[in-house]
Image: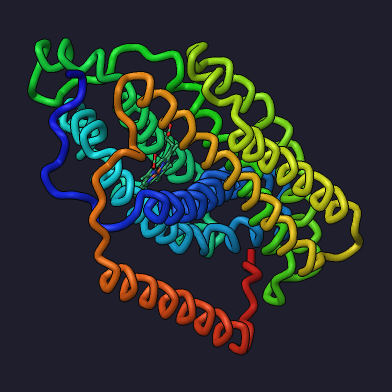
Amino acid sequence: MLFPNVDPIPIPAPVWLMKTLSLLTLTLHFFAVHILIGSLLAVGYFMLRGKKTGDPAALSAAAVLGRRLPIVMTYVINLGVPPLLFAQVLYGRALYTSSVLTGALWISVVFILMACYWLLYRISDLTHQSKSAIWQTLAALALAGVVGQFFSFNMTLMLRPEVWPAMYAHSPSGLQVPPHDPTVMPRWFFTMVGGLVGGGLWVALNSSLKTIDEDTSRLMRRFGAGFAAVGALVQVVFGYVVYQSQPQNVQEGLQGTFYKVSAGLWSVGLLLVVLLAVAHFGRKSSSLFLGWAAPVGAFLSIAGTVIYRDGIRDVTLLAKGFDVWKRTEISNWSVIGIFIALLLVGLGTVGWLLFVMKLAKPVSEQVTL
Ligand code: HEM
């Protein structure tokens, strides 16, 4: 028996519903992660450019993006919690085991995140005062990368029950990293280079702000659109590497129509991103329509990869005797109903807050030298 005994408590909602909500929220989590990583790269670039050339537009761009970093992190975390809960409920026998075996690393994520969050506030503050925050930006990028790496460690170790007994025999303290796995780095890189796409689109979208001047807007639009288009091409390469790093049986298990459609969704979404980014790049002024349309393409492409990634997990675990679709389920529909109602109220409230924000009188975000 590779996996621990089945949980005595049946799951409280159908597998399809949990999976749908998990995939939706994970898509949003990855979107936010991409914006975070890409924003940090962009802030670093604009700051270096501003310091080197004395270009106030570059410093303003760094300040505009720096100011939003702590808010972006809020979304990274809050949109990471729901898929974590769903993954634990659905795959607890695998995920709890890998989390315990690497317990020290896993719990350290909380402290690394706190340090990263603190740095984001420092960057926000320093860029607002046109001061250099290059070390803070590099450190925040490194810490975010480490968090992502630890997630990749755990999400791949949970798929390898065959290495668990030897790991536990070696040390039950949780103070170890998983043994080498050729799939880890490609997965990590794939999510991180998504930062070029998500970050680029975020920069291009913010180029439409009424709070910045024409030069800053042009700089952000051209940088953001170019960054996203190049990022989409780089991601294709890493997508291929992720696929190739999977064992033969997993590659074969992903040949079904469902996974082909999700890979197609990824490609179509990325193509849309490239086309809209190129259109935005060539414009004389920023377009709010293009600024919003391109992230829709990015959302579709991320959703495609999230479904495919879920397929990698299910196909791998199935081959090792864990069939997530066979979980015993006793649905508690009244609780599910309350959950969905609250979710809709929450989404409505966010929409209302955005509407109120739109009505607010804009205050200039240009920095002074
Ligand atoms: C700087 C912050 C973060 C970064 C850079 C980051 C990055 C990543 C990456 C790279 C993965 C993919 C791992 C893989 O499958 O190989 C991932 C997955 C995931 N992340 Fe994050 N993450 C961050 C914060 C968080 C937080 C705070 C949470 C939750 C509290 C979270 C929840 C998740 C979950 C649940 C998954 C996988 C879900 C699944 O497989 O169903 N992340 N993240």
Work out whether residue 320 can be spotted.
yes
Nearest to the observer: residue 324 or residue 79: 324
Q: On screen, 247 above or below 104?
A: above
Quadrant in the rendering for residue 99: top left
Q: Quadrant of ligand 1?
A: top left
Q: Residue at x 43, y 45 (%)?
A: 136
Q: On screen, 105 above or below 168?
A: below
With 226 as the anchor, is 91 left or right in this view? left
Nearest to the observer: residue 82 or residue 367: 82
Q: Quadrant of the C terminus?
A: bottom right
| x and y, in percent, of residue 248 in the image | 52, 11
Q: Residue at x 74, y 68 (%)?
A: 208
With 36 as the anchor, is 364 left or right in this view? right
Nearest to the observer: residue 11 or residue 218: 11
Q: Residue at x 70, y 52 (%)?
A: 297
| x and y, in percent, of residue 277 in the image | 80, 50
Quadrant in the rendering for residue 294: bottom right
Q: Quadrant of the N terminus?
A: top left
Work out whether residue 118 can be spotted.
no
| x and y, in percent, of residue 87 in the image | 32, 44
Q: On screen, 265 above or below 234?
A: below
